[in-house]
Amino acid sequence: MLITESGKEAMLYHPLDGKKVKCDLCNRRCTIAEGKTGFCRVRKNVNGKLRSLVYGKVIAANADPIEKKPLSHFNPGSVMFSIATIGCNFRCNFCQNWNISQSDEIQGEDLPPEDVVKLAKRSGCQGISYTYTEPTIFFEYAYDCSKLAHDNGLFNTFVTNGYMTVEAVKTISPYLDAATVDFKGGGDPVFYKKFSSVPNVGPIYDSLKEMKANDIHIEITNLVIPRMGDSLDRIRELAGWIKENLGGDVPLHLLRFHPDYTLKDLPATPQSTLEKTREIAKSEGLRYVYTGNMPGHEGENTYCPACGELLVSRYGFFIESWNIKDDMKCPKCGENIPIKGKYWKGKSGRSALFF
Ligand code: SF4
């Protein structure tokens, strides 16, 4: 497959007067003049047609444990062929992958969808994850890979900031099995404006509702940043919204911040802050609240919300012990544990770098 400099024609856009186009893929809804790119830098108006410049241009590919996404209630223990292109529709000051998400240069290995699926199967993966940067901005590529993945018995997961339009969610939904939707700072609109250049957080909630309506498995993360994004009231509000709109069984992962990019002077989030936020989220009625980026902490484990039995013990991305019956019930009290798919025993924690 030859991807030319001007890429592949985009999905989800419409023409405007004077050869301008409007992109309908994410909620920035950029109006793009002839010869210009959108905010994400990877979608360009070429002669009045919007083109994706990163179709098939993979900047990172790894086989990762699904727990790394993190997804704890979807095919646990499976291994995901994980890919990204450059570009992002956010500008987060604390991005861990800023060198690829904020790159100005279109770069990457040419890897057509057929080869992605072949590599995923050859490396023993059960699914494909579109991750590291924002999958929305390489939507056409993710869409074609996902379709082919389903034809080949693989599942698909997005790790996303959730800023895609409702149209985009609807379009990908036949092929998207699960999504990790990442919040930062508890969803505080002021925080999003200041540290991620996002004008309005409302569309993220709309995407989540659309995902639920389309039966996509959802897990939510929230990055807890000390001093700036660790308000307990915001966590309370976010947890309450999840309970009310998505249900108390949706897992919430509270992630520890590590200094990165332009926020190198801040300390890592104290363990006690994560523990406090976890208690608050649970008190709002969420039954599965995890801590992340603190290997060995009990917040990584799954406990039965009815009887307290330890069901899954984890260390980082590894499953150390599994104590749930094959029908996903607690062995002690019979409580139904909402885990989709199956436990891929023996695969847990496998990881390999491709490029
Ligand atoms: S995907 Fe890119 S071009 Fe399209 S609206 Fe979002 S930022 Fe703009």
Image (tube, rainbow, N blue to C red):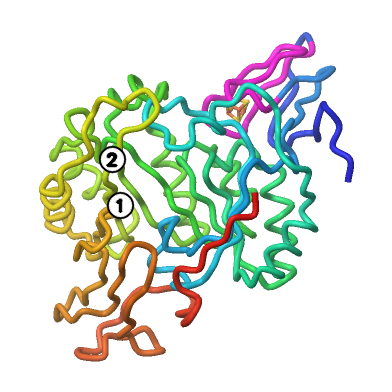
Kindly identify the residue that appears in the image at 71 percent across and 43 percent down.
140
Kindly identify the residue that appears in the image at 70 percent across and 28 percent down.
106
Image region (quadrant) for ligand 1 = top right
Describe residue 261's horizontal placement relative to residue 268 as left or right: right
Q: Which mark is residue 316?
A: none
Q: In the figure, 260 relative to 61: above or below? A: above
Helix, strand or loop under label 2: loop
Q: Which mark is residue 257?
A: 2
Question: Is residue 25 located in the magenta-colored stretch of the structure?
Answer: yes
Describe residue 212's horizontal placement relative to residue 59 as left or right: left
Q: Nearer the viewer, residue 352 or 181?
A: 352
Q: Earlier in the sequence, mark 1 or mark 2?
A: 2
Q: Which residues are magenta?
A: 19-43
Question: Is residue 322 located in the magenta-colored stretch of the structure?
Answer: no
* Residue marked by disc 1: 293
Question: Which amino acid type is marked by label 1?
Answer: Asn
Question: Which amino acid type is marked by label 2?
Answer: Phe
